Image (cartoon, rainbow, N blue to C red):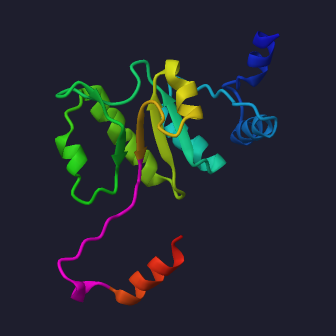
Amino acid sequence: FKRAKMALNFMSRDLTDEEKVEFVKVRIDKNMIPLVHVDPNKNLFKEIWNFAHLLKTHKIILLKKQGGLVNTEENSLVGIVNLNDADNLLRQTLTLNDDDTKYLKNCEGLIHKLAHPVSLSIISPNNILRELLTVKGAGTLIHAGSRIVTHKSWTTVDRLRLTHLLQTQS
């Protein structure tokens, strides 16, 4: 029975864009996680962009055999990459292998090309439940993040805007 349900939940490659969107929406309405096949003969990130654009999704989980990005110098998993880091401090300190560097550039291109905000998580298939069911996650989160503005003195601060910001935050 589980195999039959899984087979019904797996999307065929030969669907039109409208059929793909309908496939995903129907499964979400049924509280199912749709499994989407990406043709290996096509550009992976172009296909993902197309889906994210059509569905206006805000979170994409990419499964990668080894899991998230690895900082090879420290042999440690990179937990988060903020693409709006003004000075690119994190990326300047990262030492990634060629595959992870290419992966990060593709993810950055995907995030910046979409008209709506989106974040990507790169995880190992073994950690998918940890990614879905915990706050901490299980791989590398890549997102546009927030732009942080710094000032050297109070004279350059927009006080009305700051006051409004502080009053509206709870």
The answer to whether 41 is drawn above or below residue 146 in the figure is above
Q: Residue furthest front?
A: 170
The answer to whether residue 38 is seen in the rendering is no
Q: In the rendered view, does 79 fall on the left or right side of 55?
A: left
Q: In the rendered view, does 153 fall on the left or right side of 113?
A: left
Question: Which quadrant of the figure has residue 156?
Answer: bottom left
Report the front residue among 148 and 118. Answer: 148
Report the front residue among 47 and 60. Answer: 60
Q: In the rendered view, does 87 fall on the left or right side of 162?
A: left
The quadrant of the picture occupied by the C terminus is bottom right
Residue 18 percent location from the top left of the image = 74, 42
The residue sitting at 19% across, 28% down in the picture is: 74
Q: Is 153 covered by the magenta stretch?
A: yes
Read off the magenta span.
Answer: 143-157
Q: In the rendered view, does 76 fall on the left or right side of 118?
A: left
The residue sitting at 42% across, 31% down in the picture is: 139
The quadrant of the picture occupied by the N terminus is top right
The answer to whether 8 is drawn above or below residue 16 in the figure is above
User: Most prominent secondary structure in the magenta stretch?
Assistant: loop
The residue sitting at 35% across, 64% down in the picture is: 147
Residue 118 percent location from the top left of the image = 51, 50
The residue sitting at 23% across, 85% down in the picture is: 154
Residue 28 percent location from the top left of the image = 75, 38
Q: How many marks?
A: 0
Residue 166 percent location from the top left of the image = 45, 78
The answer to whether residue 69 is seen in the rendering is yes
Q: Is 81 covered by the magenta stretch?
A: no
